[in-house]
Image: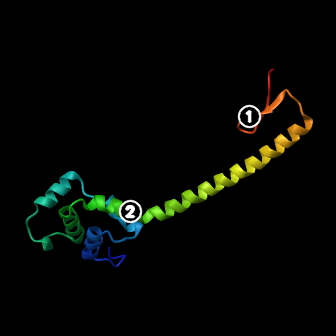
Amino acid sequence: MRALNVTMEEVCDALYEGNELPAEFLQTLLKMAPTTDEQLKLRLFTGELSQLGPADQFLKAMVDMPFAFKRMEALLFMSTLKEELNSTIESFAVLEAGKSNRRSQSSLQMHNLSMHQDPTLNVNFLGRIVLAIP
């Protein structure tokens, strides 16, 4: 958290309010999620928070927050959604360009086929020339 110059309170506020946090930061936090046993120990801890190290103080705050790690997952999803959507839109554009290219090739094939007027040849639904068996 020091590397990003973010305090524990700012992270907690962001999780409670659904404010954006950097995706890399959220991924790091999710990787350090405590095990079930560690969560239980942190929940049962009744001593002074100052007795815990900074990382354990942060994890104690996360464990005490309802659905903290689910909230992190939701924020991570929200922060990567725009990038993933743009990637998907680009992929659809490539598919659309390929489809248009395929249509123009199919149209050309059909034009060439009509010039020959061979009744034994036909174009199937994929634009491929097939032999028509009478």
Q: Quadrant of the N terminus?
A: bottom left
- Residue most extreme to the top: 134
| In-front residue for pair 102/23 | 102
User: Foreground residue, 53 or 89?
Assistant: 89
The mark closer to the camera, 1 or 2, is: 1
Q: Position of residue 42 (x, y in %)?
A: 16, 61
Please tell me which residue is depicted at 71% across the width and 36% down the height of the picture: 125
Q: Camera-side residue: 70 or 86?
A: 86
Q: Is there CB contact under 8 Å for labels 1 and 2?
A: no
Reading the image, the residue beneath label 2 is 76
Query: Is 104 rendered above or below residue 7?
Result: above
Residue 107: numbered disc: none
> In the image, is residue 22 above or below residue 112?
below
- Please name the amino acid that badge 2 sits on: Leu
**Residue sitting at 74 percent across and 34 percent down?**
124
Q: Find residue 124 and name its label.
A: 1
Q: In the shown orientation, is residue 56 left or right of residue 77?
A: left
Whole-percent x, y for residue 104 in the image:
78, 49
Please tell me whether mark 1 sits on a helix, a strand or a loop: loop
Neighbours of disc 1 within 10 Å: few (<14), some (14-19), many (20+): few
Determine the image quadrant of residue 89.
bottom right
Q: Secondary structure at mark 2?
A: helix
Image quadrant in which the C terminus is located: top right
Which residue is located at x 8 percent, y 65 percent? 46
